[in-house]
Amino acid sequence: MSLKEKPAWPKWLRDDGSVVACTEKVKVMTENFDEIKQIAQDALEDGLLMEVSEAQMREALHQLVDLLVNPYQR
């Protein structure tokens, strides 16, 4: 996939497996993931330009996702 191509984000599902079909909700999720992808791409490129190991950059980005907290946990 080139940098300009839009990724096909997943079909969004609820915990019970049903599809989130609300057009506005899907639009917000798409916009959020497009923004996250661009920010992560920029961070990766900055790291590479500063001679940080690509493997380390990718691992750090994975760790960042693992640090996300669900504030709505029941």
Image (cartoon, helix red, strand yellow):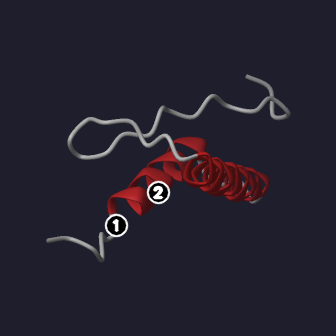
Residue 36: quarter of image: bottom right
Residue 17: quarter of image: top left
Image x and y of residue 56, in percent: 50, 50
Q: Is residue 72 above or below residue 12?
A: below
Screen quadrant of the C terminus? bottom left
Q: Residue at x 60, y 43 (%)?
A: 54
- Type of amino acid under label 2: Ala
Dot 2, crowdedness within 10 Å: few (<14), some or many (≥20)? few
Q: Residue furthest right?
A: 4
Camera-side residue: 61 or 21?
A: 21
Camera-side residue: 38 or 57?
A: 38
Image x and y of residue 30, in percent: 64, 47
Mark 2: secondary structure = helix
Q: Earlier in the sequence, mark 2 or mark 1?
A: 2
Which residue position is annotated with label 2?
60
19 left or right of 71 in image: right
21 left or right of 7 in image: left
Image x and y of residue 13, in percent: 36, 40
Q: Residue at x 50, y 54 (%)?
A: 61
- Type of amino acid under label 1: Leu
Camera-side residue: 34 or 43?
A: 34
50 left or right of 18 in image: right
Residue 67's disc is 1
62 left or right of 53 in image: left
Mark 1: secondary structure = loop
Q: Nearer the viewer, mark 2 or mark 1?
A: 1
Q: Residue furthest left?
A: 74
Q: Residue furthest bottom?
A: 71
Screen quadrant of the N terminus? top right
Whole-number angstrom distance, CA of label 2 to CA of label 1 = 11 Å
Q: Residue at x 30, y 77 (%)?
A: 71
